[in-house]
Amino acid sequence: MSEELDDEITSINAIYGDDTLVEDAAVKGIYALTFPSQPTVSLRVEFPSDYPDAPPSILGTQTVGDDVAKGEGTYLVELTREVLAEVYALGAPCVFDLIEEVNTRLQQLGLDRSARAEEEQAAQADGQQDASNAGDHRSSDGAQTLDGTGEEPPWTLSEIVSEKKSVFIARAAPVTSVEQAKQYLAHLLATDKKVAKATHNITAWRIQGQHGVQYQDCDDDGETAAGGRVLHLLELMGVWDAMVVVTRWYGGVQLGPDRFRIVNQTARDALVQAGFGQDAAKDGGKKKGKK
């Protein structure tokens, strides 16, 4: 296994779960890939020895659950092959983009089994809830609390960085008020379980309000001084009306000062890809990976 593939597997399994990409113990270079949106189907994937200079191959289904409709496994294989042909670029790891795009298309087609299961559980929980608790979503002064609902934030994602089993990814979005920034963060944590379970979600934002009023804030989320460093990055880049969230899954090995370098690296990458700041202007404001 190449070092690049090893790092990619570590990143993928840290983000989506330990069973997302698992090597076949009997056959070298063969892996079982399970999409979060189709947890009862796994695909058989072969990575060539020179990956990522050569693309992986989708060989077929590895396992298909009893609850899967006839032909659904075959369709997933065909869809994954189609998406792989679109996202693979010579010399670049592609599994993260492959998973994200396949998940998106399955959701659009109404074939997201994970979402369906969560909806059923939520409906069951709502049915058991006493009607007298209907007002619990509002605070004592009548203001609505941040419950993760509302509009889908227009996130732009950075590249994934894996360092000594720790995994980092950042996302940036335009915001026009502190309330919107808080709502976007609440939405992210409420709708993305892998992010909610991460070790740290470091946030920072800068907003220009009405009448020249300016707002800026940050949160370390347990990674001491990291939020302030990201906020300082926003200042150096001249970024306003934007927020950034850097997510880290700790891999068990302390990184020392390197963790701050990676936090800022991924934050800057997300901001540039989203078209924010002076660096984005130099880079052409190229956007990618919006989720």
Image (cartoon, helix red, strand yellow):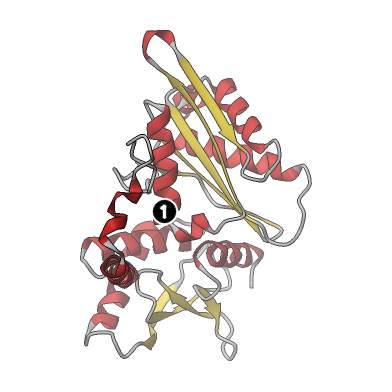
The residue under the point 39% across, 30% down is: 175
Residue 99 percent location from the top left of the image: 41, 64
Using the image as rendered, state which of residue 185 and residue 290 is in the foreground.
Answer: 185
Classify mark 1: residues with Cα within 10 Å, few (<14), some (14-19) or many (20+): some
Kind of residue at badge 1: Ala
Taking 170 as reference, is 6 left or right?
Answer: right
Mark 1 sits on what residue?
190
Residue 185 percent location from the top left of the image: 44, 43
The residue under the point 33% across, 39% down is: 144
Q: Where does the N terminus fall, quadrant-wise? A: bottom right
Above-or-below relation of 135 to 173: below
Residue 209 percent location from the top left of the image: 40, 17
Observer able to see residue 131 = yes
Q: Secondary structure at mark 1?
A: helix
> How many discs mark residues in the rendered view?
1
Above-or-below relation of 172 to 190: above
Using the image as rendered, state which of residue 135 and residue 177 is in the foreground.
Answer: 135
Residue 6 percent location from the top left of the image: 63, 67
Above-or-below relation of 283 to 287: above
Q: Residue extending furthest front?
A: 132
Specify the quadrant of the image occupied by residue 22. Answer: bottom right
